[in-house]
């Protein structure tokens, strides 16, 4: 009787402990487990990023152990399967609606023929179809033939072209066969075309080690844990602990990669319309060579002759002066120097002043007639010191009574 009373008392104490205490029992429900999606569409539309894979296959654990709760028996924690299913749905929601890849979903555990457990794909990716397939897995059964699932997955990929990501969700427990060897065989079959990623559901050390070894056999993937991919708050004793949401980072690392710039011209290969541009070549926004601007010298000359001892610009030269004015307007940073000259009749001093007045007269005509900025035109007189013809003849003296200019500028073509 004493033993019976003792047992009854302990049972009552235990129930009270469960119902009223805070000793590790989570008060959170499945709805409190959240997974924030990340839209990678914007990244993939830029020149800096591209799809890392042409195909992806999700392998989902639906074996008996996945029906177990994540927390204590009497907690409101969901089962491993529910968390797994929600994470796959979250991953699926993070992918672009128009994601141009092939996809599939294979489950393992239930059913007499694991070979037939490819419940979606391999086919052109559809967000709706992938999501429906994941949410359709509502029950668990059987042992954990992960090795067979990987082997059959190798067959699923036989007609796929390009690179493939294989993403395995599992608690890693109660395995039948050798999943690590199966992963190594898949890698041997497809080489660098396949990378394996694993997500541990739960926290069993043995399961964690198994999945880490599977990912390692794939060489180019990695292993992570469910607690790294979603956000939730659990009660631990009387304290609240939170897990950080990391699905966005996971999806980015798995599905997105930086685009290289093979020719080093500053435009990534994704947007480079002229790949293999020689090093050092100046390119435009499309990565194509820009025609180098070649400097060219352009000039215009002026010759205005004057009557004896005169500074008046004769009408026959008005057209030539207009051409010079237009040249100065076309090249607004260009300046001009007008040189005045005389014949040898008269004193040196008089002729020097006369040559200066002739140059000033031409300048005045350009400024007043064509609105050329006076600051752009300088004048200089050389008197009779620079004849271009003999002063012994009338014709020669006429040629020496002049204002000349050679206006030069640089342009590019």
Image (cartoon, rainbow, N blue to C red):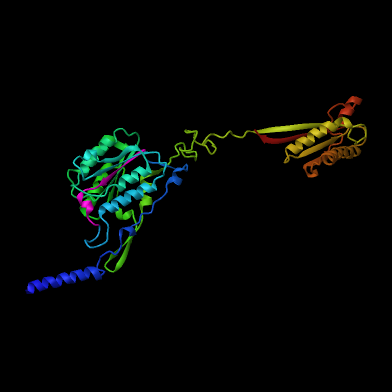
Quadrant of the image occupied by residue 124:
top left
Measured from the top left, where is residue 358 in percent x and y?
87, 37
Q: Report if residue 370 is visible in the image.
A: yes
**Which image quarter holds the C terminus?**
top right
Residue at (40, 50) in percent of width and height: 38
x, y percentage for residue 194? 31, 39
Question: Where are the magenta residues, as a range?
Answer: 53-69
Q: Position of residue 299 (x, y in %)?
A: 73, 32
Q: Could you tell whether 297 is left or right of 292 in the image?
A: right
Q: Is residue 56 magenta?
A: yes
In this rendering, would 306 be left or right of 23?
right
Q: Specify the farthest residue to the bottom.
A: 2
How many marks do you count on the picture? Answer: 0
Q: Residue at x 33, y 45 (%)?
A: 132
- Which of 92/361 is in front? 92
Near-viewer residue (182 or 335): 182
217 sits to left or right of 279: left
Relative vertical location of residue 22 with respect to residue 231 in this rendering, above or below: below
Name the residue at 19% across, 43% down. Answer: 178
**Residue 303: in sight, yes or no?**
no
Indicate whether residue 174 is drawn in magenta: no
Question: Can you tell which quarter of the image residue 110 is in?
Answer: top left
Residue at 18% x, 41% y is 112
316 or 64, which is in the foreground?
64
């Amino acid at each position: 009787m004493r033993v019976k009373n003792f047992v009854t008392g302990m049972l009552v104490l235990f129930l009270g402990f469960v119902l009223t205490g805070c000793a590790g029992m989570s008060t959170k429900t499945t709805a409190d487990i959240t997974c924030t999606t990340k839209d990678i569409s914007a990244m993939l539309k830029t020149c800096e990023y591209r799809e890392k894979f042409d195909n992806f296959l999700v392998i989902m654990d639906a074996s008996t152990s996945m029906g177990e709760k994540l927390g204590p028996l009497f907690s409101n924690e969901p089962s491993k399967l529910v968390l797994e299913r929600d994470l796959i749905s979250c991953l699926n929601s993070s992918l672009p609606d128009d994601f141009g890849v092939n996809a599939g979903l294979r489950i393992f555990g239930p059913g007499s023929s694991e070979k037939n457990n490819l419940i979606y794909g391999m086919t052109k990716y559809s967000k709706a179809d992938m999501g429906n397939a994941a949410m359709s897995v509502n029950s668990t059964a059987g042992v954990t033939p992960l090795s067979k699932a990987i082997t059959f997955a190798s067959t699923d990929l036989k007609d796929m072209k390009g690179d493939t990501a294989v993403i395995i969700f599992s608690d890693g427990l109660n395995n039948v066969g050798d999943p690590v060897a199966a992963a190594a065989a898949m890698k041997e079959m497809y080489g660098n075309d396949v990378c394996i990623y694993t997500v541990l559901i739960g926290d069993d050390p043995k399961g964690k080690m198994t999945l880490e070894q599977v990912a390692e056999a794939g060489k180019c993937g990695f292993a992570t844990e469910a607690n790294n991919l979603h956000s939730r708050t659990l009660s631990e004793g009387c304290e609240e602990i939170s897990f950080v949401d990391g699905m966005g980072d996971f999806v980015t690392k798995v599905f997105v990669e930086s685009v290289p710039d093979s020719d080093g011209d500053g435009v990534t290969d994704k947007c480079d319309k002229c790949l293999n541009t020689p090093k050092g070549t100046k390119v435009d926004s499309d990565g194509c060579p820009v025609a180098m601007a070649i400097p060219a010298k352009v000039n215009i000359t002026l010759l205005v002759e004057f009557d004896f001892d005169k500074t008046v610009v004769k009408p026959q030269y008005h057209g030539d002066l207009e051409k010079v004015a237009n040249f100065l307007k076309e090249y607004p940073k260009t300046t001009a120097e007008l040189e005045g000259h005389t014949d040898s009749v008269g004193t040196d001093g008089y002729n020097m002043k006369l040559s200066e007045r002739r140059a000033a007269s031409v300048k005045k005509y350009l400024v007043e007639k064509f609105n050329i900025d006076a600051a752009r035109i300088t004048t200089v007189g050389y008197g009779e010191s620079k004849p271009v013809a003999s002063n012994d003849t009338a014709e020669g003296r006429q040629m020496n009574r002049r204002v000349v200019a050679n206006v030069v500028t640089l342009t590019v073509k």
